[in-house]
Image (cartoon, rainbow, N blue to C red):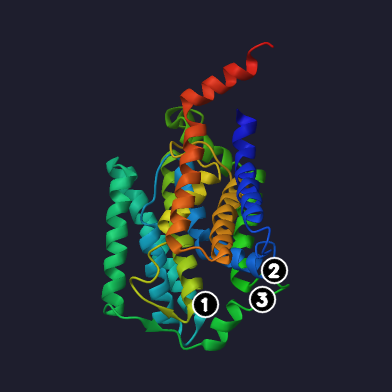
Amino acid sequence: MARYLRSRPILVFLAVLISLVLVDRAEGNILTTATVFSSLQYFSTFGLVALGLALTMLIGEFDISVGGLFGLGGCVAVLTGNTDPWVGIAVALSTGLLFGVAQGLIITGFRLDSVAVTLGGLLTANGLAYVLTLNKTITFDNIDLALALNEPIGVVLSPRSIVVIAFFLVAILIFGTTRIGRDLIATGSDRKAAMISGVRVDRLLVASFAVSGALSALGGALLSYGLASASPTGLTDVLVPAIAAAILGGVSLSGGVGSPFGLMVGILTISVLRSGLNALGVPPFVNDVVSGTILLAVAIVDAPYLSRRLRRLALRPG
């Protein structure tokens, strides 16, 4: 079962890719550099949000506020970064970091449910974005930077996608070479046992929400710079694909299961699906229907009762 959970993200990715290729076998629009570039652009759009969300899921919590911080980070970056883009990035990162720390402290200090707290964070971040922008679209004047962020590198990459891929490689390295990943998994699996074994659970929880907030705000800043604009409503549709990518990437909603590599494959699955369906020219609602069907199928296969039945069948002699 453990081997299945580790390989499941790759199996789902291959199933989605092969299905798209078979559907499009007459036209040949899927296996093209344009589709790969488009997929990696989708990957860079909500990859950091999904990574931040997954960190809190691993520890057994859930950060709904990532969608609001994504939009707020974009607005803050554009408002403060027209003169110096690095200042905008720094302010956006600081905003997301402080938001995450505040939420983590509230959750640990008052022993509150993270969903309720971060729902309040989502609404607060959205409200602040409306106030800061006066409910208007604001423009980023550095057009050269906006064009450069989306400029193809090596045909299929862009500066935005390279940055996000680099963050995932760092996350994979940290999980593989330090005890941070083990502590996250241990805390998400059994919080009391983790505390007994010496894990500073509260500190780890606050740090997880801090990193989640910072990554979400950075993702919004990069996208807003790339679009040369930001608005309080234009960057709010990343939460659902981030959740879907985490689930397809093998991150458990109950905590204690998942890895940055599996998450990266899950994000690529959603990205390839979106880009592939766009290449097929299907209506936008088909994307939601197909994504929902895949998630439902994965949920059914992962259901405890079905898993036990499959193991019994596999162990049955003859």
The residue under label 2 is: 33
The residue under label 3 is: 152
Tell me the CA gap for discs 2 and 1.
20 Å
Quarter of the image where the C terminus is located = top right
The answer to whether residue 13 is above or below residue 311 is below
Spot occupied by residue 96 in the image (x, y as percentages of width and height): 41, 63
The answer to whether residue 226 is above or below residue 283 is below
Q: Secondary structure at mark 2?
A: helix
Q: Amino acid at mark 3?
A: Pro
| Residue at 45 percent of width and 44 percent of height | 57
Q: Residues within 10 Å of mark 3 (few under 14, many from 20)?
A: some
Q: Secondary structure at mark 3?
A: loop
In this view, the mark in front (3 or 2): 2
Spot occupied by residue 119 in the image (x, y as percentages of width and height): 30, 53
Tell me the CA gap for discs 1 and 3.
13 Å
Dot 1 or dot 3, earlier in sequence = 3
Q: Amino acid at mark 2?
A: Thr
| Residue at 62 percent of width and 37 percent of height | 6
Asked if labels 2 and 3 touch by Cβ distance under 8 angstroms, the answer is no
Q: Residue furthest front?
A: 26
The residue under label 1 is: 226
Dot 2 or dot 1, earlier in sequence = 2
Quarter of the image where the N terminus is located = top right
Viewer-nearest residue: 189 or 17: 17
Q: Secondary structure at mark 1?
A: helix
- Residue 165, image quadrant: bottom right
Q: Residues within 10 Å of mark 1 (few under 14, many from 20)?
A: many
Q: Residues within 10 Å of mark 2 (few under 14, many from 20)?
A: few
| Residue at 65 percent of width and 65 percent of height | 29
**Residue 53 visible in the snapshot:** no
Viewer-nearest residue: 33 or 247: 33
